[in-house]
Image: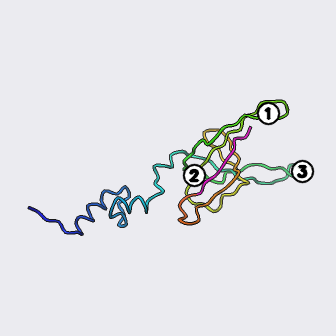
Amino acid sequence: MLTETAAQVNYQMASTCHLRYWHCWSRFACRWWCDMRAGLLRTRITVMQPISGKDVNGAVTQDWAEFGRLWADVRNKSGLETIKADKVTGIVRVSIRVRYNTKLNNAMRVIVNNVIYNIKAVMHDVNSREYTDLICEAVT
């Protein structure tokens, strides 16, 4: 009969972690430490930022430049139909979770599967600094 030491048991438990890091000595520690797993971020998004320029007549124009491409978890939160200017318009709101990024702001926009969303709010996870949530509305 083989007896295993505590160090051998901890090593075997650590090897079952998806990241195989030393801190994952148990499945509970792995859930706590590795909460922002890459498997949840399965949608590729493009973040656009506004840039100002001048045209040939000297008038100020606003255009969009690519800020970056990120992996994200996109969740449709709500849809709403309203009447504006005697037309029925739909408002689609989504929540987009990306890795922690303090450079994102609500002047930017996001493109997900060829649909453009304006960022309405940016909420950073200031306690653990693992993720940033973007509350967005579809551009109509």
Q: What residue type is labelled 2?
A: Arg
Secondary structure state at the residue bearing disc 1: strand
Residue labelled with disc 2: 97
Q: In this view, does 31 lie to the left or right of 54?
A: left
Secondary structure found at label 3: loop
The alpha-carbon separation of the residues under discs 2 and 3 comes to 37 Å
* Front in this rendered view, residue 26 or 52: 26
Mark 2 lies on a secondary structure that is strand
Q: Which portion, as a residue range, is magenta?
A: 132-140
> Is residue 85 shown above or below 124?
above
Point out the frontmost of discs 3 and 1: 1
Mark positioned earlier in the residue sequence (2 or 3): 3
What type of secondary structure mainly makes up the magenta span? Answer: strand
Distance of label 3 from label 1 (alpha carbons): 34 Å
Q: Is residue 97 left or right of residue 5?
A: right
Label 3 vs 1, first from the N-terminus: 3
Indicate how the structure is coloured in the image: rainbow
Q: How far apart are marks 1 and 2 (CA)?
A: 30 Å
The quadrant in which residue 112 appears is top right
The circle on residue 59 is: 3
Residue drawn at the location 36% of the way across and 63% of the way down: 24
Q: Which residue is drawn at 57% across and 54% down?
A: 98
Q: In this view, does 49 lie above or below 89?
A: below
User: The N terminus appears in which quarter of the rendering?
Assistant: bottom left
Q: Which amino acid does label 1 sit on?
A: Ile
| Label 2 neighbour load within 10 Å: few <14, some 14-19, many 20+ | many
Frontmost of labels 2 and 3 is 2
Side of 49 where 37 appears, left or right = left
Name the kind of residue labelled 3 in the image. Ala
Label 1, on which residue?
A: 83
